[in-house]
Amino acid sequence: MKSVFNFQLLLITLFLLMSSVWSLESMNDDLLYPYQGCHGSRHSHRQLREIQSGINSTYESWTAHVSSEKLPATTTRYFVADIPLNSYYTYEKNHVYGHYTTIRNPRLTFSVVEPAGEGCNGNSTATVEKTSVLRKCIVAQNGGYFNTTTGSCLGNVVSDGKLARDSHGVQNAHFGITRNGTIIVGYLSEGDVKALDFLQLVGGVIWLVRNGTSYVDEAVSLEEEDTEETGTLRHFADVQSARTAIGHDEQGRVVFVQVDGQTGVRGVNLAAFAKYLIDEFHLVNAINLDGGGSATLVLNGSLASYPSDHCKGAPKWRCPRSVTTIICAHSPDCEPVCVNGKCIDGSCICENNWHGEACDVLRCAFHNCSAHGSCNQSGCFCYPGWYGDDCSLPCPRRRYGTNCSQICYCENNSSCNPVSGECACLSGFMGKACDQGCPAGRYGRDCSFSCHCSDTCLCDSVTGACDAHINTSIYSTLLNVSQCLARNFWSTTQMDTPDVNSRQYQYRLIALLSTALGALAISLSLNALCMWRFVNREDNDSPASSTDEASISSESSDGATVRQANSLRSGLLRHIVHRIFPRGRYEKLNANGDVIEMEERTLLSAVT
């Protein structure tokens, strides 16, 4: 048991030790500065142009690789080689370990990436491992030079189309790619940086390979400064150290090369490095990037190179240095840029209901909402009056509104508008809920038409037919109107006459009586006219004698009195009487009040 406990304690100790090592920082002790003072060549861009013999341009351009096959985006190989330092050094062996990466379709798969935070503007630094996560780099390598004291970026930096650092014309070798897919390598003026519309741009020191030949010696003279920390620029080029480079081959593929080493101990110098890039990798143009303790290569987020800086607090270990920019090979970017989706391996995977190459076209269901709704990420939003997944179904009967969620309250079998819910009344009905019948003299939908019958003022409320059966309630209405006019007339004639003997009062009384009599005459004429057709119809259907005798009994011996009427011989008057004046039951009583006779007759209170 004791041995098991000791073994567990050992594992815990090792774990804590490794955790502390992994969290250690670099001492930044393997420094390889190209310049001691200000970074950059002492020559202006105009002077560089004049110094170059037989060359009109200060930079070279090459068409970047383009292929319809987006994958694989990049390939990395590990190499071990014996590289002589230069032609006049004689070493039996100079073992070099490093990585060689080719990048296809570099306009979409290659980027210069700033560290998290404010990047070059904020003098931020981070290890290549941490920064590579920001762009999901498959392969990441340290990029341009920087001030190890302040963390400020040196040289021009353009990251994904954004100018992150402007060197204001300082002349050092640069490598970049423009938006139109042209690779640019060489010395750039301040105007060139703005005019060439770079998508990615990173600065280095020493142009290694130009048009397939070594350009180290020429670059040393062009980029020379008076002094630097490890000696002159020539010594910087000749010293053994860890190195990194970026360039391109004849196919236009971007190439990363990283070599492990330690300044003055192992690695390669720039002349041997350039020769190896040409002989083994067939590069056309290439520049030297930051080396020494900065030289780092990361594969899929994990450190793959051997750093040369020692770790703070644990000098027997080696730690990667925090740097500013990195160069990154990643999965292809989508072109055009995905608007509403995710870019995966160069293709847009659209979110719900988004379509198109850039996922910028909304289209819902099979018929895109059937033109009865609007499409959004959640699906079809149907217009009022429609429902269903694709808004192809109209609202069912007695339903209306958005998603047909409202209920119609239309009576008499009327329908409602599926959008607004307004009732559409059938013929013969009117009102907001179609709950009212047409008034006398009106017919049709919403009772919007007037009756036009030659012998009556009434018609069928649905069709407007003149020979239709008229509801007896209409006659009751006419009777009520006539009786009302008669009561008003009677009330007018019974007014108290003022004790004023004036001609003006007499005129007013005569006018009032004339008006009342005229109204009564009009009412009786309308009743007679409306009944005429029905009189003729009944006479034709069932012939009857043209005269009826109506007797009103005289006063009997037991005290009952009966008034006998004259015969009504006119057929028209008989029908008017029957319809205007109701029929009732009359009882004959004896002196004791007992009923001795009962009969049904028409009440003619006005006929003697």
Image: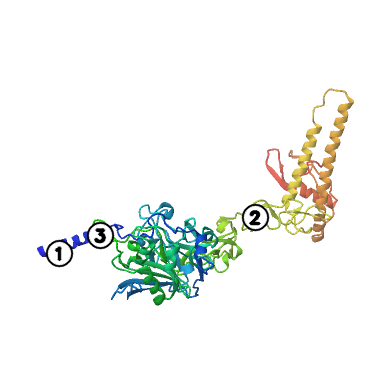
Mark 1 residue element: helix
Rounded to the nearest angstrom, the CA distance separating label 3 from label 2 is: 82 Å
Q: Residue 550, relative to residue 260: is it above or below? A: above
Residue type, mark 1 in image: Phe
Q: From the image, which quarter does the C terminus lie in?
A: top right
Q: Nearer the viewer, residue 316 or 279?
A: 279
Mark 2 residue element: strand
Residue type, mark 3 in image: Val
Residue 306 position in % (x across, y down):
30, 66
Using residue 302 as the reference point, say whether residue 248 is left or right of it.
Answer: right
The numbered mark, 3 or 2, whose residue comes first in the sequence reads: 3
Residue 43 position in % (x across, y down):
47, 59
Q: Residues within 10 Å of mark 2 (few under 14, many from 20)?
A: many
Q: Are marks 2 and 1 in contact (CB under 8 Å)?
A: no
Rounded to the nearest angstrom, the CA distance separating label 2 from label 1 is: 89 Å
Q: Which residue is mark 2?
A: 423
Label tally: 3
